[in-house]
Image (cartoon, rainbow, N blue to C red):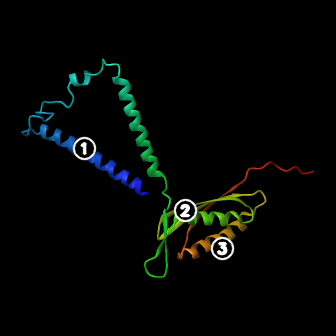
Amino acid sequence: MSPLLRTVNRVLLGLAGLVLICGGGAVLAAGLGLSVPSWWPWYGKGDVLLSEADRDRWRGEGWWWPTVIALLAVVVVLALWWLLAQLRRARLAEVLVDSGDGEGALLRGRALEGVLADEAGTLDGVARAQVVLTGRRSSPRARIRLLMEPHAAPDEALGRLTDEALAHARDSAGLAELPAEVRLRAVKHRAERVS
């Protein structure tokens, strides 16, 4: 999960918790008949959250319903953005490389992705390769998509990817292992005529 998304999650959860605690506390205090300050919105057990006058106050105004609908639309869009951000797998920003001094060095995840994609793209029968690193920085995982040429042998390309590109990336980053999920897809092409 990215630091920005982690921060947004914490802020949203903190605000939601604060609103729920304050609102619930105010209603609970009034419902229990506790002595409340004069500015408190509810005074006793018989008081309602929204009186009929409060509910009908803005209905006659022309700007009221468009404002309510626009505000609710913004809330729905933000909620959907937040939900999709939670479901999306986060890219690994950096990989911890064993530098031999006991502390290690940090390698940008995009750099390792680019090198791995470039090497995988040069394999025979591979038209294009895409690589995304996920997991933790000390134990990354690779998701690889290979777009295969019509003449390619998938088993041969997969074997060379494992023995060459993944092995080089694993060895250069000093990783004990680099698990990978590989998806193969064929390039769309016209059928050849046989005469």
Residue 53, placed above or below residue 28: above
Farthest-out residue, right: 195
Q: Which residue is mark 2?
A: 110
Viewer-side residue, 33 vs 166: 166
In the rendered view, does 103 fall on the left or right side of 36?
Answer: right
Residue 163: assigned label: 3
Residue 136, placed above or below residue 5: below
Q: Quadrant of residue 156?
A: bottom right
* Image spot of residue 95 (x, y percent): 49, 68
- Residue at the (55%, 71%) spot, across then down: 178
Q: Secondary structure at mark 1?
A: helix
Query: Which one is earlier in the sequence, the residue at label 2 or at label 1?
Result: 1
Quadrant of the snapshot with the N terminus? bottom left
Q: The residue under label 3 is which amino acid type?
A: Asp
* Image spot of residue 172 (x, y percent): 58, 75
Q: CA distance from mark 2 to mark 1?
A: 41 Å
* Image spot of residue 116 (x, y percent): 62, 66
Query: Which one is earlier in the sequence, the residue at label 1 or at label 3?
Result: 1
Residue 154: assigned label: none
Query: Which one is earlier in the sequence, the residue at label 2 or at label 3?
Result: 2
Q: Which residue is mark 1?
A: 20
Q: CA distance from mark 1 to mark 3?
A: 56 Å
Q: The residue under label 1 is which amino acid type?
A: Leu
* Image spot of residue 141 (x, y percent): 53, 66
- Residue at the (40%, 36%) spot, across then down: 74
Q: The residue under label 2 is which amino acid type?
A: Arg
